[in-house]
Image (spheres, rainbow, N blue to C red):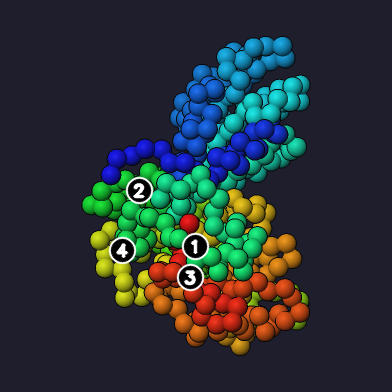
């Protein structure tokens, strides 16, 4: 399969932010396409500088003002190009104050485009230093539509949230994906690995983990034993798509609950881990309050679980959690694009009823379940039906069961099965 840059859903949001904010920060994990997105969107009209952990590129750390002045970003100056892309900005934090001074003198939308791989070191520092001057865009791996070269279209979740009844009854078409579902889960959604031959993927993931442990995690976490942190990363993968109990999780490898929480925060800060908060509407509601955790890339999760490409995934105990990890990741990525600021939550009543995802959008509750089976039936809708009954005073939209099914169909009153790979 030949490689060519794919249109990203995030391009439209990047252009919107750059049209109103003088600084735009694109952050995300390694190999999710931050540099490619900036280059595809603004490369022809921008000058690009890539910073390095070991080298002070063009003296930017030593003399940030001179670095920017030499490119014409001074009052009355004429920049070499109208925009400046500063890639891997976490390696030149000294530039932030210099950028602030220039933005305060002349607020030209989109003049500085920054990218970085470490959320704590980039987002927190920039948010504090460039408050009111910067807009932020978190980028993750491909959506299914982007893999299928449909990244220019609006994600289907946006259409569903605007008109749930109309969307599910329209029998939306499915995407033409290049790989069967089990292979796609083992391959994951990192852009750079989509065109690798299957026999090389294990080495690709191994290199990714090694680089992550040696550079990204080490840069922000005080960890004395990196082999132990690597074991913790594999333990987190073994608990993907599960509620998180820090005490129980730490007991498996002899860590305190405090250390578990700190290391999970490290994984989150470096975009390797995401949590869905528990959904509840009142303090006395008898529901779980624990978050549910997920490795952000399902291919990485499979690798950490020791499932190399080519594994016969169907029928294994990992099949369900990995499919849920992929489906939740897909909806998280779509939701960040179509309704920024709205988050996914999960629901589990003490009586046993569960719903994998709840989206609260414009006052309406949207329950979404995930089933790793080709033909969901009424029994699979029990969690959504119980959620609707428990929230009868709320506006609950038609529920969805995302599954590897062929087409959309009703499984119960107000509950539809939907192919997880619809356009």
Q: Residue at x 47, y 41 (%)?
A: 7
| Residue nearest the viewer, comparing 37 with 288 | 37
Gap in angstroms between the C-alphas marked 2 and 1: 25 Å
Q: Nearer the viewer, mark 2 or mark 1?
A: 1
Q: Which mark is first along the chain, 2 or 4?
A: 2
| Disc assigned to residue 2 | none
Q: Nearer the viewer, mark 3 or mark 2?
A: 3
Say whether marks 3 and 1 touch (CB < 8 Å): yes
Foreground residue, 167 or 83? 167
The x, y position of residue 348, in whole percent, is 60, 78
CB under 8 Å between callouts 4 and 1? no
Return the residue found at the far bottom.
Answer: 351
Q: Give the image quarter of residue 110.
A: top right
First in sequence: mark 3 or mark 2?
2
Residue, x 59% and y 31% (percent of image)? 113
**Label 3 environment density (alpha carbons within 10 Å; few <14, some 14–19, many ≥20):** many
Report the side of 247 relative to 373 (left or right): right
* Observer-nearest of 186 and 327: 327
What residue did someone put label 4 on?
Answer: 307
- Residue positioned most to the left: 199
Q: In the rendered view of the protein, which quadrant contains the N terminus? A: top left
Q: Nearer the viewer, mark 4 or mark 1?
A: 1
Kindly identify which residue carries mark 1: 172
Instruction: Name the element at disc 1.
Output: loop
What is the crowding at mark 2: few (fewer than 14 residues within 10 Å), some, or many (at least 20)? some
């Amino acid at each position: 399969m030949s490689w060519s840059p794919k249109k990203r859903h995030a391009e439209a949001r990047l252009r919107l932010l750059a049209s109103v904010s003088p600084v735009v920060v694109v952050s995300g994990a390694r190999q999710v396409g931050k540099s490619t997105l900036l280059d595809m969107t603004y490369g022809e009209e921008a000058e690009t500088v890539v910073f390095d952990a070991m080298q002070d590129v063009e003296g930017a750390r030593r003399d940030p003002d001179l670095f920017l002045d030499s490119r014409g970003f001074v009052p009355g100056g004429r920049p070499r190009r109208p925009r400046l892309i500063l890639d891997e900005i976490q390696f030149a934090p000294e530039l932030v104050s210099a950028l602030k001074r220039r933005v305060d003198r002349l607020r030209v939308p989109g003049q500085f485009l920054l990218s970085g791989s470490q959320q704590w070191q980039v987002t927190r520092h920039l948010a504090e230093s460039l408050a009111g001057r910067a807009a932020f865009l978190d980028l993750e791996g491909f959506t299914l539509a982007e893999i299928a070269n449909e990244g220019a279209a609006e994600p289907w979740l946006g259409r569903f949230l605007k008109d749930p009844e109309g969307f599910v009854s329209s029998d939306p078409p499915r995407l033409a994906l290049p790989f069967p579902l089990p292979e796609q889960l083992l391959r994951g959604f990192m852009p750079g690995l989509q065109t690798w031959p299957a026999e090389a993927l294990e080495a690709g993931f191994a290199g990714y983990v090694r680089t992550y442990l040696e550079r990204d995690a080490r840069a922000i976490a005080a960890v004395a034993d990196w082999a132990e942190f690597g074991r913790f990363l594999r333990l987190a993968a073994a608990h993907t798509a599960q509620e998180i109990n820090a005490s129980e999780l730490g007991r498996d490898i002899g860590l305190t609950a405090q250390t578990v929480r700190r290391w999970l925060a490290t994984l989150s800060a470096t975009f390797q881990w995401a949590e869905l908060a528990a959904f509840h509407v009142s303090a006395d509601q008898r529901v779980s309050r624990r978050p549910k955790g997920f490795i952000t890339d399902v291919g990485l999760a499979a690798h950490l679980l020791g499932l190399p490409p080519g594994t016969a995934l169907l029928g294994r105990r990992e099949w369900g959690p990995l499919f849920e990890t992929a489906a939740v990741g897909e909806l998280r990525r779509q939701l960040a694009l179509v309704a920024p600021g709205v988050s996914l939550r999960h629901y589990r009543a003490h009586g046993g009823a569960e719903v994998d995802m709840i989206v609260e959008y414009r006052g309406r509750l949207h329950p979404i379940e995930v089933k790793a089976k080709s033909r969901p039936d009424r029994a699979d809708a029990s969690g959504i039906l119980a959620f609707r009954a428990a929230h009868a005073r709320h506006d609950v939209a038609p529920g969805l069961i995302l599954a590897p099914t062929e087409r959309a169909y009703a499984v119960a009153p107000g509950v539809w099965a939907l192919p997880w790979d619809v356009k």
